[in-house]
Amino acid sequence: MSRRAKQTTRATFCLLTVVALSGLSCHAQNPPTAPAPDKGPAVVPTPRSRTEAPAAVQGGVSVDGSEAMFTTMCALLAAGFEADVSSDHWSAYRTQMRARMQAQQGPAVEALRQFYREHQLADPGAMLSRYLWFGLVSGPAPRFTPTLRRDELPPEILVLEGFSEILSAYYTEQKIGQLWRQVQPVYAREIDHLHDQVSQIVFVTSGYLREIIDSNNERTFTIVIEPLVGRITNVRNYGDHYAIVLSGGDDIPTDVVRHAFLHYMLDPLPLSYPHVVVVKRPLFEKGAAAPRLAQELRDDYPSYLAECTVRAVELKLKKMSPGERDAALQRDDLDGYVMVRPLFEGLAKFEGSEPAMKLYFPDLIRGIDMNAENKRIAAITFAPEGPTQANAAFDKEEVARRRALQPAALPNDSAAIADLTEGERHIAEKNARAAEESFKRVLAKYPDQTRAWYGLGLVALLLDHDMARAKEVFSGLTDGEHAADKDPLVMSWSHIYLGRIYDNEGHADRAKTQFEAALAVQGLPDRARDAAQKGLEVVNTEKPAAQP
């Protein structure tokens, strides 16, 4: 997958959050009370009120059912989807539900069937894909209004214009809410079955990356259980929200879940360090010529680098013999994922270090030897176009990626980029004067280069502790002659640093304004969002200074 492994809707799912590598806690939506042994059937409790807010999904990892997805699949079956498919290998539940849905009658059902016929595709897989997207982005019953703005919706949703109203009428006419409550034991049983396997994947993966999943982060990773989908694994993401739709059963596709979860953890990193990763772009350009490389990655370097990083970490986490690992690396090379091998080799140093991956990532990228890799890749003869065993496991993925906002101010000048990278390295080494010289060399050629000005601001703030100079530089980047309008990283962090300076000076109102401005920046990095939110929490809880 590239990929950004794929999202779940923010509504109707109960959140399970993993904090400090703790185990998962999985709950079905409106979960039933478990029956006591030999004391009769399970008791399904009354669901929460329709006016009550759905369970929060503000970051974290969850395994859940979705009433919106369930209703969408009931509607599909009622409309005739898979009506002519043999149910010999279906679960009893899915077989019974199809028969029940096909027998439904009423004006809303007829309107639903008419809509289905008018939008039917020859490819049933593509047809299912549209409605899965709908179920993932739909808000709660009974309206099923999309949770995203129209310009944020995946393209598959736009062709289903008017389906929310039709589904809402169907939901009410056929009492799907009551049916959803009746089938809760099925979903609760599947969710409970997945608990240990998902917990292990999250625990091992997060532990290897040395990352703690922040429950306050707006990014989400959700496994949606829907037996009516069938035995197909669907992996989705849009923006910062990732989802996998599973049908349940005895075993989960561990490799697919881990692959998707790694994307959830690693996708933001190339976008967080664009001036570091851009130096290695020539390797991507060579790999992009491979016939087997996924089409959507050919012009998307950040996603390509994220995919290669995911594959490199997977090779560390999978139980493989040395021969199997070598074969996997060779397949990646032949398929165009030429950065997997140097990243895999660089992970050895990461394993012997202390920082979490989100902090170590720049060193992982810098550790790639361009000369050695250019020579190695030149000797590779890419495989001809055709399916590969490595990609077959993920051929059911659907990816909708929001294009990353790239800093247009980065010059197309390898020397200038090298100076920017060197300046950042000198800041990490706390060598203020060397860093300053590197950034000034860039400004001598490009006086409005925002990354160079930003570097000077960091030198003033973090190394020289010159608050007046730092304030001057960051103000120029937010609302001055060097405003970083096309660089969300620089713009957001400049606001954040100004907010911290004002807070230290005792100007809480000015600090609050800066933190709010940072959060309003389109495309701001996750770490910047977290920092701005924490800054707001601090200034909002501080007591106002005593008036003279």
Image: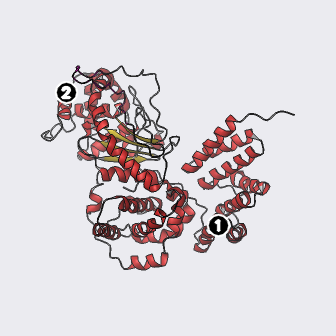
Answer yes or no: is residue 523 visible: no
Let me know if residue 116 is in the magenta part: no
Q: Is residue 285 left or right of residue 383?
A: right
Identify whether 126 is placed above or below 38.
below
Q: Which residue is mark 2?
A: 100
Predominant secondary structure, magenta span? loop
Name the outermost residue toward the right. Answer: 548
Picture coordinates of residue 445 (x, y %)?
68, 71
Which mark sits nearer the N-terminus, 2 or 1?
Answer: 2
Picture coordinates of residue 369 (x, y %)?
49, 75
Which disc number belongs to residue 361? none
**Quarter of the image that includes the C terminus:** top right
Q: Secondary structure at mark 2?
A: helix
Q: In front: 399, or 53? A: 53
Tell me which corner region of the image, top left, top right, bottom left or bottom right, holds residue 391. Answer: bottom left
Span colored in magenta:
26-44
Identify whether 258 is placed above or below 26.
below
Identify whether 289 is placed above or below 203.
below
